[in-house]
């Protein structure tokens, strides 16, 4: 299993990074939409729709909605996304009592649209932005740093559970460790580009927010998998489960990061 995880990561990570850097915005938007549609195919199963036709239809619907919202103003789509993650936080915090809100299959599909469509939209908006590829890489590395820091800090120091009813292995110590590593990454970026003190502090504050929201994305998918009674969203990625299992943190972090970046003017 570990060997599979490493091999899959060694293949996917360079492809993802190369795509972010070298693809044109148009090609990037199409390929990203295809990935989101695969994630939607997995989400349909999380919602309780097992039939292949149902899952394909939801995947196509997600792609269609991505196309329909693409010309809409960023503050509308990303604002809806930010509001949705506030709701998701309440669902995670109140679980298992809030589990009743997640029992409707149709509602879970709607939650999938609120999660996946803004994530695609945010990536496309960032890609079109000045130095958009670098901005996307930055938020990717922030999320990965938060994940890696949380893993090692949690294993070494973890005692206090973060959301025991949703994901028993996550701890407050892991959360802090992940945020510290993400802040370290952001600080290095700020120093390298010689940010002013005010801009640097803004970057660190944004990093903390993005790090926390990325954990929320992970927790919310864990909540749905717990409700559905499954471990992985699929087996598309050997050793890693499904696409959703790899991008759950990013689906929450990227829209929030993009909203803050675009509203601040960079």
Image (cartoon, rainbow, N blue to C red):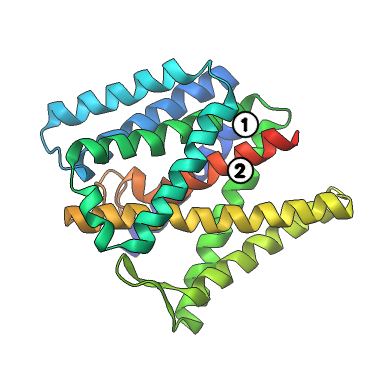
* Local crowd size for mark 1, using a 10 Å CA cut-off: few (<14), some (14–19), many (≥20): many
Side of 121 relative to 207 (left or right): left
Q: Position of residue 78 (x, y in %)?
A: 54, 33
Side of 89 relative to 24 (left or right): left
- Which residue is found at the position 35% from the left and 33% from the top? 113
Q: Position of residue 262 (x, y in %)?
A: 68, 33
- Which residue is found at the position 58% from the left and 34% from the top? 20
Q: Secondary structure at mark 2?
A: helix
- Which residue is found at the position 68% from the left and 38% from the top? 261
Front residue of this view, candidates 70 and 188? 70
Q: Position of residue 162 (x, y in %)?
A: 42, 71
Res. 89 image quadrant: bottom left
| Residue corresponding to mark 2 | 257
Front residue of this view, candidates 186 and 161? 161
Numbered mark located on residue 181 in the image: none
Say whether disc 1 or disc 2 marks the residue closer to the N-terminus. Answer: 1
Q: Quadrant of the C terminus?
A: top right
Side of 260 relative to 35 (left or right): right
Res. 125 image quadrant: top right
Discs 1/2, front? 2
- Does 93 sit above or below residue 14? below
Front residue of this view, candidates 150 and 236? 150
Q: Position of residue 260 (x, y in %)?
A: 66, 41
Res. 51 image quadrant: top left
Q: Would you say the residues marked 1 and 2 are in contact, meaning their CB atoms lie under 8 Å apart? A: yes
- Which residue is found at the position 50% from the left and 61% from the top? 147
| Residue corresponding to mark 1 | 126
Side of 105 relative to 194 (left or right): left
- Does 24 sit above or below residue 40? above
Can residue 20 be spotted in the picture?
yes
Q: How many marks?
A: 2
């Amino acid at each position: 299993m570990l060997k599979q995880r490493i091999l899959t990561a060694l293949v996917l990570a360079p492809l993802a990074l190369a795509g972010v850097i070298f693809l044109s915005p148009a090609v990037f938007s199409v390929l990203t939409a295809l990935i989101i549609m695969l994630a939607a195919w997995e989400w349909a199963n999380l919602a309780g729709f097992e039939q292949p036709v149902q899952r394909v239809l939801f995947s196509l619907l997600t792609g269609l909605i991505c196309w329909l919202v693409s010309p809409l103003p960023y503050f509308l789509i990303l604002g809806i996304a930010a509001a949705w993650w506030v709701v998701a936080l309440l669902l995670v915090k109140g679980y298992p009592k809030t589990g009743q809100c997640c029992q409707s299959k149709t509602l879970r599909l709607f939650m999938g649209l609120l999660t996946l469509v803004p994530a695609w939209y945010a990536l496309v908006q960032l890609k079109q932005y000045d130095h958009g590829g670098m901005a996307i890489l930055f938020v990717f590395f922030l999320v990965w740093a938060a994940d890696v820091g949380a893993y090692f800090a949690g294993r070494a120091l973890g005692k206090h559970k973060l959301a025991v009813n949703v994901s028993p292995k996550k701890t407050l110590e892991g959360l802090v460790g992940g945020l510290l590593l993400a802040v370290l990454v952001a600080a290095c970026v700020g120093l390298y580009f010689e940010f002013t003190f005010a801009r640097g502090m803004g970057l660190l504050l944004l990093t903390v927010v993005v790090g926390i929201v990325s954990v929320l994305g992970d927790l919310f998918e864990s909540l749905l998998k717990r409700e559905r009674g499954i471990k992985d969203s699929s087996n598309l990625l050997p050793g890693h489960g499904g696409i959703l299992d790899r991008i759950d943190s990013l689906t929450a972090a990227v829209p929030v990061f993009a909203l803050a970046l675009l509203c601040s003017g960079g």
